[in-house]
C-alpha cells in the first residue's frame, strides 16, 4: 500500500483561539481571523494545536471551535486537527471515537510528562496508526513534551506505517531535521515547527511550516515561505531579516501570548488568555508594538 499524499505544504497556521473579556470563546473574532488569514494566502490550517490553548478548552469547546472553524474555512484549504494524549490507551479510544469530521489528517504529539523511551514512543504511535481513521502527522516538540523524537525513530515510523505521512519538527535541532530529510522515504514529509528556522530547512526538502507568527502576518510570512519554496532565497532572506526580532518577541514570554499581543494591536482579537497562560508584560507588549511599526514601515 502506498503512503497517503501529504496535503500540508506551504504556510500552515497554528490557529489561535480568541477569547472575550470574560474568557469565553469569541466566535465573531475567530471568523474574522480566518477570513483575514485566507485572504493573506495561507495554504492550510492546524486547529486545536498548542497555539490554540487547547489544554484549557473543555472537550465540548474543542468540538465547537473545530466545527465552527471548519464551517468558516469551507473547504478552501486543508485542515489538520490536533489530537494528543500521554496515555496511549486514551489516545486509541479517542481515535476510535473520532468526531472531528472535516479534518484531512491528525497531528499527534510525542507523549508528554511520562518521558518514554524511543521504543515507548514508537509503540505509542504504532498503536495510534493501527486505529486512526485519518492519516497521522507526528509532532516533535521536546521543549513542551520533555522527550525528543529522535531521527531514527521518526524514520522507523515513516517506513513502517503508510498512514504516518509527515512530521511537524519543532525540536530546533537543525542537524536532526536535516538527517530526517536525508533518510526519510520519498513520500514522507517534513514540516517545520519553528518560524525562525523554516527558511534554513526548506532548501533541504522541508515542505512548509505550521506557523505561530503567520496568525498575525499571513501575507508577509507566507511570502517568505513561498519564495523559499520557489528557490528565490534572496527575496525570502530579505523578509527574514525584517522578522528576526519579532520571532524572538513572539516567544520571549511563551506562546501564544506573544502573537495574541500583536494581534490585539492589529485589532484582530482581545489580548485574553486562559490560565495558566497570562498576557505578556507591558514591556514586551510595547516592544512588540515598536517592532510591528518597524516591520510595516510606519
Image (cartoon, rainbow, N blue to C red):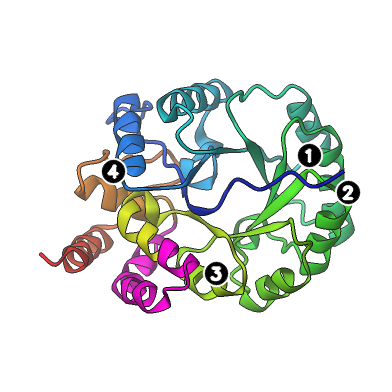
Q: Is residue 16 left or right of residue 176?
A: left
Q: Earlier in the sequence, mark 3 or mark 1?
A: 1
Circle 4 crowding by C-alpha within 10 Å: few under 14, some 14–19, many from 20: many
Secondary-structure class at tag 3: helix
Mark identifier at residue 123: 2
> What range is drawn magenta here?
225-254
Residue 225: x %, y % from top left: 44, 63
Residue sitting at x 73%, y 56%: 188
Q: Nearer the viewer, residue 25 or 36?
A: 36
Residue 283: x %, y % from top left: 24, 63
CA gap, disc 1 to disc 4?
Answer: 33 Å
Q: Are marks 4 and 3 in contact (CB under 8 Å)?
A: no
Q: Earlier in the sequence, mark 4 or mark 3?
A: 3
CA gap, disc 3 to disc 1?
Answer: 33 Å
Circle 2 crowding by C-alpha within 10 Å: few under 14, some 14–19, many from 20: some
Q: Nearer the viewer, mark 4 or mark 3?
A: 3
Q: Earlier in the sequence, mark 2 or mark 3?
A: 2
Residue 251: x %, y % from top left: 42, 62
CA gap, disc 4 to disc 2?
Answer: 40 Å
Mark identifier at residue 209: none
Q: Earlier in the sequence, mark 1 or mark 4?
A: 1
Q: Which residue is mark 4?
A: 271
Q: Is residue 251 magenta?
A: yes
Mark identifier at residue 202: 3
Magenta span main SS: helix
Q: Are marks 3 and 1 in contact (CB under 8 Å)?
A: no
In the picture shown, does residue 213 fall above or below 73?
Answer: below
Circle 3 crowding by C-alpha within 10 Å: few under 14, some 14–19, many from 20: many
Q: Which residue is mark 1?
A: 87
Secondary-structure class at tag 1: loop
Amino acid at each position: 500500500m502506498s503512503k497517503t499524499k501529504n496535503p500540508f505544504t506551504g504556510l500552515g497556521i497554528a490557529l489561535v483561539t480568541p477569547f472575550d473579556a470574560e474568557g469565553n470563546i469569541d466566535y465573531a473574532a475567530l471568523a474574522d481571523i480566518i477570513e483575514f488569514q485566507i485572504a493573506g494566502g495561507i495554504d492550510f490550517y492546524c486547529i486545536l494545536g498548542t497555539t490554540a490553548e487547547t489544554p484549557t478548552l473543555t472537550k465540548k469547546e474543542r468540538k465547537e471551535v473545530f466545527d465552527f472553524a471548519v464551517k468558516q474555512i469551507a473547504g478552501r484549504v486543508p485542515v489538520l486537527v490536533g489530537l494528543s494524549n500521554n496515555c496511549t490507551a486514551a489516545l486509541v479510544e479517542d481515535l476510535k471515537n473520532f468526531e472531528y469530521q472535516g479534518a484531512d489528517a491528525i497531528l499527534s504529539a510525542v507523549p508528554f510528562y511520562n518521558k518514554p523511551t524511543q521504543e515507548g514512543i514508537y509503540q505509542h504511535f504504532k498503536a495510534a496508526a493501527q486505529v486512526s481513521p485519518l492519516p497521522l502527522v507526528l509532532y516533535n516538540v521536546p521543549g513542551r513534551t520533555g522527550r525528543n523524537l529522535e531521527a531514527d525513530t521518526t524514520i522507523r515510523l515513516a517506513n513502517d506505517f503508510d498512514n504516518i505521512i509527515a512530521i511537524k519538527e519543532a525540536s530546533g535541532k537543525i542537524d536532526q531535521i536535516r538527517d530526517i530529510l536525508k533518510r526519510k522515504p520519498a513520500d514522507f514529509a517534513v514540516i517545520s515547527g519553528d518560524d525562525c528556522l523554516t527558511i534554513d530547512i526548506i532548501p533541504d526538502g522541508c515542505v512548509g511550516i505550521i506557523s505561530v507568527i503567520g496568525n498575525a502576518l499571513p501575507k508577509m510570512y507566507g511570502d517568505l515561505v513561498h519564495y523559499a519554496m520557489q528557490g528565490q532565497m534572496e527575496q525570502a532572506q530579505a523578509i527574514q531579516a525584517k522578522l528576526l526580532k519579532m520571532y524572538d518577541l513572539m516567544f520571549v514570554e511563551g506562546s501564544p501570548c506573544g502573537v495574541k499581543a500583536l494581534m490585539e494591536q492589529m485589532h484582530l482579537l482581545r489580548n485574553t488568555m486562559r490560565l495558566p497562560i497570562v498576557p505578556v508584560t507591558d514591556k514586551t507588549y510595547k516592544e512588540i508594538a515598536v517592532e510591528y511599526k518597524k516591520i510595516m514601515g510606519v
